[in-house]
Amino acid sequence: MIADTTRRPRSVTLAVVLVMLGTLVAATTAAGPQGAATLVLLLVAVCFWFAVRAGRGRRGARTAVTGLTAAILVIAAPFALDDPLYGGSTLLFAALLAVPGVILLHLPAADAYVRARSGESDEEMIGG
């Protein structure tokens, strides 16, 4: 049985789902040149992998998910804004999904979960 200190908070599970959905929606807007679409799909696949690892309490994966999510939204922006009908709203929807997911990964409950999973104490985090 898992101790309560290492049980994954629901906010972390929700964060992983939101990040995955947001990056997937952002990837659908990058339907431009083949090279850009391939790059975005590769970034999404790597972001999914890191999101799963972040959900398991890996500190480095949280940082990677944050950077990859930002990169995917930035790379998808020119393609989304080039589509006059739905592109901008699709990118906004992707950001409304992914950004709260990233924020949830950095809330105090998620920090406590990561510390418990990595075996760090509060004193080690403060530096004393």
Image: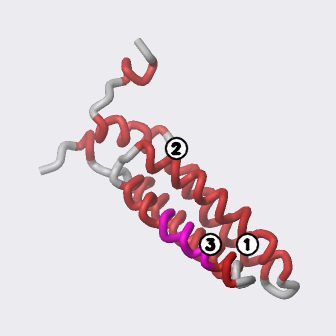
Helix or strand or loop: what does disc 3 sit on? helix
Three-letter amino acid code at the position of disc 2: His
Distance Cα–Cα, label 1 vs label 3? 14 Å
The residue that appears at 42% across and 54% down in the rendered structure is: 12
Lower position in the chain sequence, tag 3 or tag 2: 3
Q: In this view, does 5 lie above or below 86?
A: above
Name the residue beneath numbered marker 3.
40
Residue under label 1:
91
Residue indicated by mark 2: 106
> Which of the 4 image quarters holds residue 118?
top left
Q: List x then y, in percent, for residue 89.
A: 77, 77
| Residue drawn at x 35%, y 35% as measured from the top left | 115
Nearest to N terminus: mark 1 or mark 3: 3
**Range drawn in magenta:** 38-47
* Depth order, front residue of 65/94: 65
* Amino acid type for the residue under numbered disc 3: Val
Q: Residue 33, image x and y in percent? A: 73, 83
Question: Which mark is nearer the camera, 3 or 2?
Answer: 3
Q: Where is residue 28 in the image (x, y as percent from the top left)?
A: 65, 81
Among numbered discs 2 and 1, the one appearing first in the sequence: 1
Residue 59, image quadrant: top left
